[in-house]
Image (cartoon, rainbow, N blue to C red):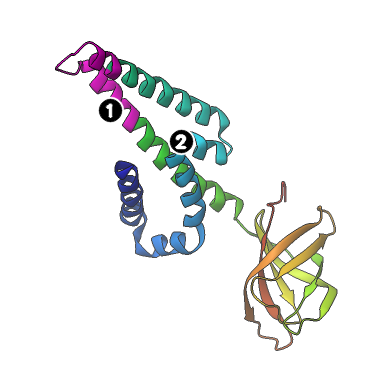
Amino acid sequence: MNILVTGIHIASAGMEQLHGGAEMASWNGCYARYGNKAALLTVAFPGLGQVHNKQFLKGIAIAGAFCICSFGFAYLYLHRLASYWTNPSDLSIYLFLLTLITWEVSLFDAFFCAIKFRKRDGKRFNTQEPVRVSGVDVNKEKFEQLVPMRNLSKTGACLAVPREIEKGSLLNLEFESRPKCRGRVIWQRQMDREDQLLVGVEFLTPLAVL
């Protein structure tokens, strides 16, 4: 387990070297939590992180390789104890190393792929399409109105809203040509016009298509 925890720290250090401090800060603030979730699943069992990333065949292959290596090592080790061997066989050492390598490779792959897929789904496209938004503002008043979008991605949208909404509030969104969805306010800032705010919304369930 200590080896795996060390692997997570090495992954973080590697990202900083490969992508620079500014990029690393961006990942830590926005995307790293998705990689962390996949990595923790991999710590629980190799292959689960890949399944979480919807890479099912890769997850099955990694889980199968891990099981073969670990069970092979366990069999040889127990057989050595039962036979009173004094020196471990070369094969058992190789299987032990392969087990650790499989775990580490699965950990790194799940972490980086989760971030890569989230960044891909988070790519935003400019649009002026109107969307009907309903929810509760900072004054605890319910509202429902048609507002313009500034940009849209599979994971969220930027809206121009003529009222202040508390961060973390849930909104219902009805698009003209897409299914209804719910989203959470994650940021807002004042526009040039004093009567409107830019509001960033993260969808609770990503859109299947744009």
Image quadrant in which you'd find residue 176: bottom right
Q: Nearer the viewer, residue 115 or 182?
A: 182
Question: Which residues are drawn in magenta?
Answer: 77-100
Q: Residue at 85% of width from left, 73% of height from top?
A: 144
Residue lying furthest bottom in this view? 194
Q: Helix, strand, or loop for circle 1?
A: helix
Residue 17: percent from left, percent from top = 30, 55
* Residue 98 position (above or below residue 175): above
User: Which mark, residue 6?
Assistant: none
Q: Mark 2 against mark 1, which lies toward the viewer?
A: 2
Q: CA distance from mark 2 to mark 1?
A: 17 Å
Q: Residue at 23% of width from left, 22% of height from top?
A: 93
User: Which mark, residue 97?
Assistant: 1
Amino acid type at circle 1 is Leu
Amino acid type at circle 2 is Phe
- Crowd band around label 2 with a 10 angstrom C-alpha radius: few (<14), some (14–19), many (20+): some
Image quadrant in which you'd find residue 99: top left
As drawn, is 162 to the left or to the right of 24? Answer: right
**Quarter in which the N terminus is drawn:** top left
Q: Residue at 68% of width from left, 52% of height from top?
A: 206
Residue 177: percent from left, percent from top = 83, 54
Give the main secondary structure of the magenta stretch: helix
**Looking at the image, can residue 128 be seen?**
no
Decide whether residue 102 is among the magenta residues.
no
Q: Mark 2 — residue?
A: 45
